[in-house]
Image (spheres, rainbow, N blue to C red):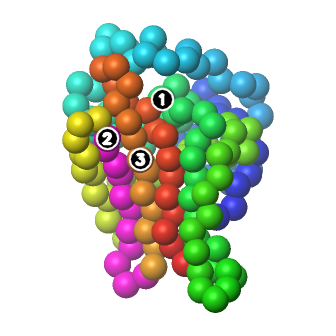
Amino acid sequence: LAVVACKPQTAPSTANKPSTPAATADTGHAEQPAGPAQSDAATCPAADFNGFAEKFASSISVQAKYTHWPLESTSIDAAATPEPKPVTKQVSEQEMSYPLLMAFDRAKREGQSVEMTQDPPDGAQIHYTKPDTDYSIRYLFKRQGTCWQLVAIKDESL
């Protein structure tokens, strides 16, 4: 898992571009209120998780607003001995690049499966996989007030 320091652009058309330095630009720190204030029902992108997830995946500005920083990031260290093991760290917004996850329609065009599930009482996840490969990334969300926030990314790919 490569982590590149970039910032979100305000143009929504960048949501479907790849997560590379060329796809994003340093536009300064995105303002995001702390805690439940940003989770007000009037400002939440959708009433249910599936609707929220669709908007989150397709909009960099929604990703910037509804991501909890520092973000927990887990990846597999394939070089670990005697066998690969997960490594978890806290990453700042400056260490990540947008989009944090691929838009659903693009993922499906690229042969990936996208599964959304809710984990009662206040959790949910989006799971991207690619058949016949070891590609598996989970995006974990927690309900904060009446809306959701991305709190962790678990890259289970080898």
Of labels 1 and 2, the one closer to you: 2
Q: Are marks 2 and 3 in contact (CB under 8 Å)?
A: yes
Main SS type for the magenta part? strand
Type of amino acid under label 3:
Leu
Q: In this figure, what is the number of numbered marks?
A: 3
Which comes before the other along the chain, label 1 or label 2?
Answer: 1
Q: Quadrant of the C terminus?
A: bottom right
Rendering coords of residue 70 (x, y %): 63, 37
Q: Residue furthest front?
A: 82
Q: Nearer the viewer, residue 42 or 125?
A: 125
Of labels 3 and 1, the one closer to you: 3
Q: Residue furthest bottom?
A: 82
* Whole-number angstrom distance, CA of label 2 to CA of label 3: 7 Å
The relative height of residue 116 versus residue 78 in the rendered view (above or below) is above
Please give the name of the residue rendered at 31% of the width and 41% of the height, measured from the top-left corner: 123
Residue 123's disc is: 2
Residue 140's disc is: 3
Q: Nearer the viewer, residue 25 or 50?
A: 50
Please give the name of the residue rendered at 57% of the width and 59% of the height, measured from the top-left corner: 74
Please give the name of the residue rendered at 24% of the width and 45% of the height, measured from the top-left corner: 118
Type of amino acid under label 1:
Tyr
Crowding at mark 1 (Cα within 10 Å: few <14, some 14-19, many 20+) = many
Q: Secondary structure at mark 2?
A: strand
Q: Nearer the viewer, residue 140 or 11?
A: 140
* Whole-number angstrom distance, CA of label 3 to CA of label 1: 12 Å
Q: Secondary structure at mark 1?
A: loop
Residue 133 placement, left or right of 122: right
Q: Is residue 127 magenta?
A: yes
Rendering coords of residue 39 (x, y %): 39, 18
Residue for badge 1? 66
Q: Is residue 22 visible?
A: no
